[in-house]
Image (spheres, grey):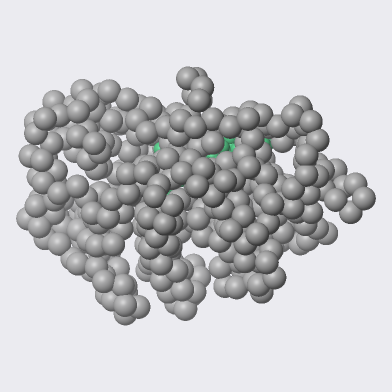
Amino acid sequence: MVASCVQSNPLWPARDRFPKLEGKSAADIVVIGAGIAGMSCAYHLSSAGYDVAVLEMDELGSGATGASSGVLYYGSGTNFVPAIGLFGRERAALLWKETAEVIEDIARTIAEHGISCGLTREGAIMAAKTDGEMELIRREHAALEEIGIKTTVLTAAQVAEYYSPSGFLGGLAFGTCGQIHPGLFIQGLARSAGIRLYENSEVTGYRREGGKIVVSTKAGSVSCSKAIYATNAQPCFGMERHFRLESSVIIAGEPVADIGRVWPKKTIIWTMEERYDLIYPQEGRLVLELYRLEGREQKLRHYYPGVEFRIDKTWGKAWAKTSDFMPIVGEVERDVYVAIGMGDQGIIMGWLAGRKLAGLMGGKEPDWFLDLASPKRFGHVRT
Ligand SMILES: Cc1cc2nc3c(=O)[nH]c(=O)nc-3n(C[C@H](O)[C@H](O)[C@H](O)COP(=O)(O)OP(=O)(O)OC[C@H]3O[C@@H](n4cnc5c(N)ncnc54)[C@H](O)[C@@H]3O)c2cc1C
């Protein structure tokens, strides 16, 4: 264990440290980037019997994953109704059902490996501020009901039973959603699955040598058969043209004694603007997550009126998001893959991307998810 820590999340950082890659090494598959996408790839590929090495330029969880609120919700970053417009009804339904199952899968994995990462299943509420948003909520509820996903439309008074300052006109409650501390989740995975991880090992490039791929850092290299770039917001095979960078910031207040007065239940609430806000209680603290820091003071007063919110910690990170809200997952060059652009629902998407990519490498045919997430949708054709 090393005291220094480059992760931005001060409340629940991953504390285990891993060695730096030095000298020459070999593995079946090299994963570049130790966020949720890279660690899910590593976990699922290791579970399938491959010898995997992960190379991380900073620390496990030092990217968006460690900074994340870790809310586990369905889909890939939109509501279901707009997703029907983007992907068609059948695929949108598959996406919602599979991501609902991914939440269960993450919970199962946490239980199976005894990972301590703050998993809660208190549900979530999408809250409306206007009549127009209430109408969207009713449509969302009806569309989700048609595919068998249960939600409950809440009145203003019912929202206030979860979060007393409310001021919302109503909301849509999702019972099975939850939250984890993502940095601790991937730390637990690395340890319990015995993943070979190297920190402070920035990948500078790779070359092909005798049928192998040799992935290099300044201090070493790993020879492998396949490589996966899970580097989130970094430039990557020109794919960065197809995502934009967002930046989320979390503000946590000092612990308050009577938090139950504000949050009678420990659920998560998000608003419905394109750049929505998230509010939730966390370990006795009032929390607000924003896109950037714009309007911070005014929003704190708005969401926590009459409450003395003493800012204790503020942190954030950049993350990549594509215009169709799907990540970019697939082969970009012979035996070189990407799992990037995980977006708003990056924790769920990252876990799913790793699971799907491991299946593909194990010989499964690409399915609807890999088709939706394929680099080919941007005209990137494998060379
Ligand atoms: C404040 C905040 C709140 C969020 N809240 C939520 C939420 O509630 N729910 C949700 O689902 N999503 C949320 N997100 C989004 C989500 O966290 C991200 O989409 C997701 O974590 C991205 O995962 P990743 O593995 O692709 O990227 P990262 O976690 O950024 O991992 C990429 C890793 O690659 C490493 N890397 C890059 N280049 C190299 C290189 N050349 N060599 C070696 N390593 C390299 C980086 O150091 C980094 O560790 C939030 C994000 C932020 C910042």
Q: Quadrant of residue 277?
A: top left
Q: Which residue is rendered at x = 79% and y = 54% of the image?
A: 225
- Quick one: 78 or 74, which is closer to the camera? 74
Q: Is residue 373 visible?
A: no
Looking at the picture, how far across and down is residue 91, in whole percent? 49, 74
Instruction: Examine the rendering and report whether any part of residue 200 can be seen.
Output: yes
- Left or right of 46 on screen, residue 68: left
Specify whether 176 is left or right of 326: left
Which quarter shows the C terminus?
bottom right
Quarter of the image holding residue 117? Answer: top left
Q: Number of callouts in the render?
A: 0
Furthest residue in direction right, as rendered: 210
Residue 201: percent from the left, percent from the top? 67, 31
Q: Position of residue 164 (x, y in %)?
A: 9, 45
Image-based side of 253 in relation to 98, left or right: left
Image position of 377 with respect to 211: above or below: below
Identity of the residue furthest to the top in this view: 3
* Residue found at x 54% / y 49%: 193
What residue is drawn where x is 78% and y is 44%?
26
Residue at 57% in and 41% down = 34
The location of residue 221, given as percent across then percent down, is 78, 36
Frontmost residue, 90 versus 286: 286
